[in-house]
Each structure stands twice: as C-alpha cells, then as structure tokens.
Image (cartoon, rainbow, N blue to C red):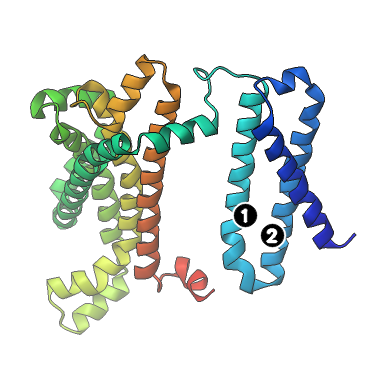
Amino acid sequence: MPKYVLTIVYLSLLAGQLALVSSSEQGFYQQSPALLMLLAVSAYAVSALLSQLTQLAETRPSYAAVTKVLVPSLFAFMLLLTWQSIVVGFAVSAVLLPAPSDIFYSLTNNLPMFWADFKQTYLKAVLAGYLLGCSAGFIVAQVAVKNRFLRAGLVPLGNFMSAIPIVGIAPIMVMWFGFDWQSKAAVIVVMTFFPMFINTLAGLQSTDAIHNDLMHTYAANKSQIFIKSQLPQALPFIFNALKLNSTLALIGAIVAEFFGTPIVGMGFRISTEVGRMNMDMVWATIVVAAIAGSLSYGALALLERSLLFWHPAFRGSHKR
C-alpha cells in the first residue's frame, strides 16, 4: 500500500477519535468499552506517523526543520487527546484530574487574572532575584578564582546551601523582607547564587595553559586575558548555570508565595484554588508557569547557540 494512503488512514483514525471525544457524553467508555479499541488504534496511528516523519527527515534533510516541529507537536496532541478521552470516557472527577478542555477554558476565560499573577511572580520576583543572584555569583567567582581562601570557604558553603530546602528558607525571607515580591526575590537569590558561583568558578579554572601562555606572549593585561581567553572558555559553564537557574528561580518564587504574598501571584493562585477545589484553575496556573519556564529556558538556549557557535558542541548543528 502506498505511503500516502497509509498516512490518510492514520489521520482518519486520529480524526475519528477526536470526533468521538468531542461528541460523546461523559462516561462513554463505561457504556461501550469496545470504543477503547479506537483509542489504542489511534495511538498506533500516531506512532506510525511519527515514524514516517522521522524517516522523512533522514531521507530529505530539507524537511528536517518542519519535522522537528511536527514530531513533538503530534506527540503532544496525542497525549492531550488520550488525557481528554480517559477523563471524559470514564467520567473522572474534576477534583482528581480535570480534562484539558476544562483547563483551556479556565485559562482563556481568566486571562487578566493570570496576567496579574504572571507580572507579580515572574516579571517582579523571578527576574529581580534571577538577575541579582546570577550577577552576584558571577562576580564573586571572578574574585574567588584568584583567592584560594575565599574559594576554599565558599565551595563547601555552596554544597551546604544546596541541601537546604526551599520551605526552610522561604518563611525566614518573608519575615525579613515582607509579604511582597522582595521576599520571593531574596529566596531566588539564595537559590541561584551558588549554582552560578560554582559553575563560573569551574569555567574560569578550566582555561588551558596554552591559551594563558599565548596571552602572556602577546603581553596582554588582566582584563584582556579575561575577555579574550577566560570568559569565552567559561561561557559553556556559565550558560549551564543560567539555564538551571531559570527553572530554579520560577520554582523558588512559586513555593515562596505559599508562605505569604499579596492576593496575587502564581503560588497564591495555586494554594487558594486548591482550597476551593478548583483544580482546573490550579492546572491552568501550572500551564502558565510551564510556558514561562520553557520560554525562558528556550531563549537562553538560543542565546547560547548564537554565542557559542564556535564550540564543538554546537559547530556541527550550526552548519546544519
């Protein structure tokens, strides 16, 4: 059978499952268990479509960029369709697991509220704490790489601080800095300082002796050595810390808001709506946080790729 015919069959099965979920009443799997076969066949059809897209990318490199987007998108669509089918088909309580359609409805119908939560948590607390923590870790690492005693004292302290849970730091910071975003930013500074410090220190210490000798041969001063030799070689380590901290900062801000915040913020929204059993709102807030974290991480990954195009880890992919 030609491949395009199989593709049409697979897409038809997927469309059939989507139509079934959209038009059926709650508990349709309980009434007709045989309909589960269509869900299983649809999952197989998606698996076959993903295999076709992967082969297309290998045989025709010009389609690689398109398939790179289609493959995860199709997988995510099938995951959401399965989720929706199980919740609706078995009439699962919304308290246990809301359907993706309910989450989407809550998200789109409360956009002003979610925007206010996003501004409070991300644009104020996360960005401020992230910039302060990463900048402080970077600056202190530059000093510590030249000071053995400071290095010997801060590295064990960083290991100690990484073992302290957020729930232990957050109440203290709320008492020190108040209930607004400043206390959440302080928690983020504590969480992001040491990952940046340790990674930057490792990066600055990884400079090759050959490069140092070459810079001395050119009679370079300390600032020229740092900018031309040390910093470029430390950038992979620094970006590792930046990407790690981008997720840690958001997690820290949300958890810190559980211990005191104005009546706005992602953490406040989650804790409040859980108490009201509005789990669709809780999941919608999680979606907003996940999108914000993914965009932050993706932006840093793109910046890393553009700045480190010369690095062996990116050289081949940059050419492609």
**How many callouts does the rendering have?**
2
**Crowding near the residue tagged with mark 2, few <14, some 14–19, many ≥20 C-alpha atoms within 10 Å:** some
Position of residue 286 measured from the top left corner of the image (x, y, whole percent):
40, 34
Look at the image and tell me whether residue 184 can be seen: yes
Q: Are marks 1 and 2 in contact (CB under 8 Å)?
A: yes
**Crowding near the residue tagged with mark 1, few <14, some 14–19, many ≥20 C-alpha atoms within 10 Å:** some
- Type of residue at label 1? Val
Position of residue 275 measured from the top left corner of the image (x, y, whole percent):
35, 15
Query: Looking at this view, is 305 or 25 the one in front?
Result: 25
Quadrant in the picture for residue 121: top left
Residue at far front of view: 23
Residue beneath the point at 72% across and 62% down:
55
Query: Looking at this view, is 183 or 309 the one in front?
Result: 183
Residue at far bottom of view: 218
Seen in the picture, residue 8 relative to 157 is either above or below; the reply is below
Quarter of the image containing the N terminus?
bottom right
Considering the numbered disc 1 on the image, is that residue within a helix, a strand or a loop?
Answer: helix
Say which mark, if any, is on residue 53: 2
Residue labelled with disc 1? 71
Position of residue 17 measured from the top left corner of the image (x, y, whole percent):
72, 38
Position of residue 128 measured from the top left corner of the image (x, y, whole percent):
18, 45
- Type of residue at label 2? Leu
Look at the image and tell me whether residue 165 can be seen: no
Seen in the picture, residue 247 relative to 33 is either above or below; the reply is below
Quarter of the image containing the C terminus?
bottom right
Residue beneath the point at 51% across and 69% down:
317
Query: Looking at this view, is 179 or 139 the one in front?
Result: 179
Quadrant in the picture for residue 180: top left
* Left or right of residue 50, residue 313 in this image: left
